[in-house]
Amino acid sequence: MSAASETPHGEAGGEHDHDIDPRHVHGHDGGHGSGAAHGTFKGYVIGFLLSVVLTAIPFWLVMDKVFADPKTTVFIVMAFAVVQILVHMVYFLHLNTSSEGGWNMLALIFTMVLVVITLSGSLWVMYHMNTNMMPMSPQDMRNMP
């Protein structure tokens, strides 16, 4: 073993790369240098508290019938659901524009586009199937097998 390879952190280099302690080589410490976000206890607690609040408020709105119009309640509950999805993505899945060089965000956007196309296409087909079905009277419905 040469004296150059015995220097701390491999600063002077050496003949053998395996002599360098891998814990001291930056960029190879379990993915910390990959740009991926890592959760902290504080971040998980904030995410959990936001999730509880974003669940409790819609629960209260529905159980106490705060709004007279059910459509208003549904709209508000759906808005809280969207916000809660964003909270989960940021605090628990650690998705942001910088992780994995932006590929995580690109994959998320692609998935959302596919979900929107699938849902809107399904609703469009169901609406047109319902509109174009032959109308039946209640009398005809009673005679069905």
Image (spheres, rainbow, N blue to C red):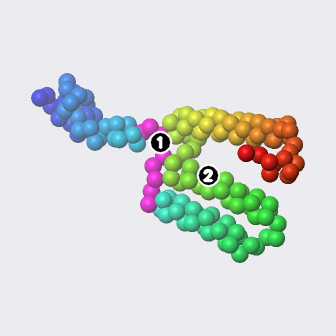
**Residue 141 shown left or right of residue 60 in the figure:** right
Residue 36: mark: 1
Residue 6 shown in magenta = no
Name the magenta segment's main secondary structure. Answer: loop
Q: Amino acid at mark 1?
A: Ala
Q: Which residue bears the numbered disc 2?
A: 86
**Image point (65%, 35%), residue name:** 114
Residue segment shown in magenta? 33-41
Q: Depth-wise, is mark 1 or mark 2 nearer the camera?
A: 2
Q: Which residue is at the far bottom?
A: 64
Q: Using the numbered discs, state the Cα–Cα distance from disc 1 to disc 2 in whole angstroms.
A: 18 Å
Q: Amino acid at mark 2?
A: Leu
Total count of labels? 2
Does residue 42 lie above or below 18 as drawn? below
Secondary element under disc 1, as helix, strand or loop, is loop
Residue 34 shown in magenta = yes
Does residue 13 lie above or below 55 as drawn? above
Residue 50 picture location, percent across and down: 58, 63
Would you identify the image quadrant in which residue 14 lies? top left
Residue 7: mark: none
Q: Earlier in the sequence, mark 1 or mark 2?
A: 1
**Residue 78 shown left or right of residue 43 in the figure:** right
Residue count near mark 1 (Cα–Cα under 10 Å), binned few <14, some 14–19, many ≥20:
some
Nearer the observer, 63 or 35: 63
Residue 20 picture location, percent across and down: 23, 34
Residue 108 picture location, percent across and down: 60, 39
Does residue 62 lie above or below 96 as drawn? below
**Image point (55%, 37%), residue name:** 104
